[in-house]
Image: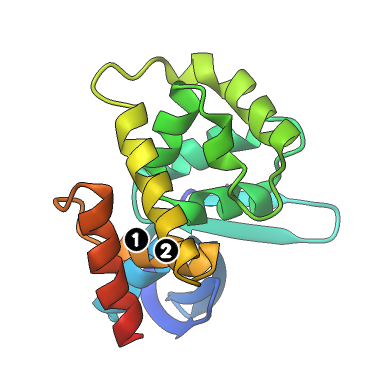
Amino acid sequence: MISQLEGKIVFSGDRYVVIDVSGVGYKVNATLETLRKINKEKSRVRLWTYLAVRENALDLYGFEEQGDLEFFELLLTVSGIGPKSALAIMNVAPTESIRKAISTGEASYLTKISGIGRKTSEKIVLELRDKLGAWTDIGSPELQEESDAVLALQSLGYSQNEARNALKKVPHEISGASLRVKEALKILGNA
């Protein structure tokens, strides 16, 4: 199996990157966050990878952090969740936020993902909650804050995806729904 790639970026698309490793170009599907980070580096990149083997395709999925790869693989253990769905889930919010939502049983947080309905999100929470363990540091307040910020941006006319993408770019040091909304509006205004 291919568990890691290191090489030069030769092409970067909206959902994937092509990495030249000793003259061989590997197409690696990645989260938007991973693509954003590696596109800043431009030269050499190292990704932890998962090889999805299907009857008619071999697809690589890459992650900058090994913890993100492990979470991706954990999502794949849920029946009905394939690599594309798992990647879509990871595109919505930082991995830690999604882990907290699952650990605290907040299935509604996951229903905000395009293509993930209430039943599927409840199944994810049910099947992964014990595997992830309980969050003892913080949980619901942070998730509620982010949900409130998304709803506030949506009420101003932005789509859910636009709101989430802008909130992803807001530094984590900024807390409070209203402050996060202000920063997100600045980001959306510059786009």
Q: Count the labels in the image.
A: 2
Residue 155 placed where, x, y %?
48, 63
Q: Secondary structure at mark 1?
A: helix
Q: Is residue 50 left or right of residue 101?
A: right
Q: For the C terminus, which image quadrant? A: bottom left
Mark 2, residues whose alpha carbon is within 10 Å: few (<14), some, or many (≥20)? many
Q: Secondary structure at mark 2?
A: helix
The one nearer the camera, 168 or 43, is 168
Q: Earlier in the sequence, mark 1 or mark 2?
A: 2
Q: Which mark is residue 78?
A: none
Looking at the rendered structure, the kind of residue marked 2 is Leu
Residue 135 placed where, x, y %?
33, 20
Quarter of image, res 184: bottom left
- What residue is rendered at 54% in x and 72% in y? 16
**In this view, 13 is above or below 130:** below
Do tag 1 and tag 2 residues touch (Cβ < 8 Å)?
Answer: yes
- What residue is rendered at 84% in x and 60% in y? 56
Q: Which mark is residue 167?
A: 1
Residue highlighted by disc 2: 153
Q: Is residue 145 left or right of residue 120?
A: left
